[in-house]
Image (cartoon, rainbow, N blue to C red):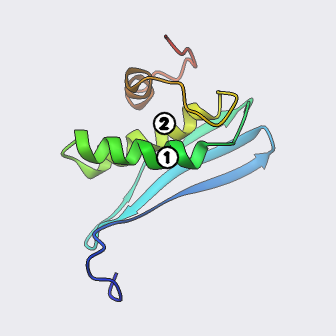
């Protein structure tokens, strides 16, 4: 950030792989002042990892546009990424409501369409 002063946030996700079908995901953000870490999601029975990074990035953009709190934005991104692991193919087919339910603690795994 010192080298590129117009950058306001540095964001990434951590993946801890226990096996090909079992991972733990959490997001992290540095906003120039504070380090923010999202909730961690334990994902078992992974269907497809393709598109999970895109789901994280899209979730972050959505979160930054719709939440005033950076922590909520990061948690939305991480939840969107986590849910994408249950969808075959590269597109995340879950709704914003599905992501919000996971953020609020509903870990039932049910995706309502």
Q: Residue furthest bottom?
A: 3
Q: Secondary structure at mark 1?
A: helix
Contact between labelled residues 2 and 1, with CB atoms less than 8 Å apart: yes
User: Residue, x 64% and y 37% (percent of image)?
Assistant: 90
Q: Position of residue 67 (x, y in %)?
A: 23, 41
Q: Residue under circle 2?
A: 80
- Crowding at dot 1, Cα within 10 Å, few <14 / some 14-19 / many 20+, comes out as many
State left or right for residue 43 relative to residue 82.
right
Q: Residue furthest right?
A: 19
35 is higher (above) or lower (below) than 57: below
2 is higher (above) or lower (below) than 57: below
Give the Cα separation between the discs numbered 1 and 2.
6 Å
Q: Position of residue 47 (x, y in %)?
A: 74, 30
Q: Position of residue 34 (x, y in %)?
A: 29, 67
User: Residue, x 44% and y 22% (percent of image)?
Assistant: 98
Q: What label does residue 11 carry, if any?
A: none
25 is higher (above) or lower (below) than 97: below
State left or right for residue 20 relative to residue 57.
right
Q: Residue furthest top?
A: 113
Q: Secondary structure at mark 2?
A: helix
Between residue 77 and residue 25, name the one nearer to us: 77
Q: How many marks?
A: 2
Between residue 8 and residue 23, name the one nearer to us: 8
Name the quadrant of the N terminus.
bottom left
- Crowding at dot 2, Cα within 10 Å, few <14 / some 14-19 / many 20+, comes out as many
Between residue 57 and residue 45, name the one nearer to us: 57
User: Residue, x 22% and y 47% (percent of image)?
Assistant: 69
User: Residue, x 33% and y 41% (percent of image)?
Assistant: 62
Q: Position of residue 41 (x, y in %)?
A: 56, 39
Q: Could you tell which of marks 1 and 2 lies nearer the N-terminus? A: 1
Q: Residue under circle 1?
A: 56
């Amino acid at each position: 950030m010192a080298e590129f002063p117009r950058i306001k946030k540095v964001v990434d996700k951590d993946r801890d792989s226990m096996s090909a079908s079992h991972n733990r995901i959490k997001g992290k953000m540095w906003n120039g002042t504070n380090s923010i870490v999202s909730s961690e999601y334990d994902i078992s029975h992974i269907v497809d990892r393709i598109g999970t990074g895109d789901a994280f990035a899209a979730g972050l953009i959505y979160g930054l546009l719709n939440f005033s709190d950076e922590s909520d934005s990061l948690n939305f991104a991480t939840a969107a990424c986590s849910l994408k692991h249950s969808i075959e193919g590269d597109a995340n087919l879950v709704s914003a409501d599905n992501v919000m339910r996971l953020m609020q603690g509903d870990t039932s795994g049910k995706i309502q369409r």
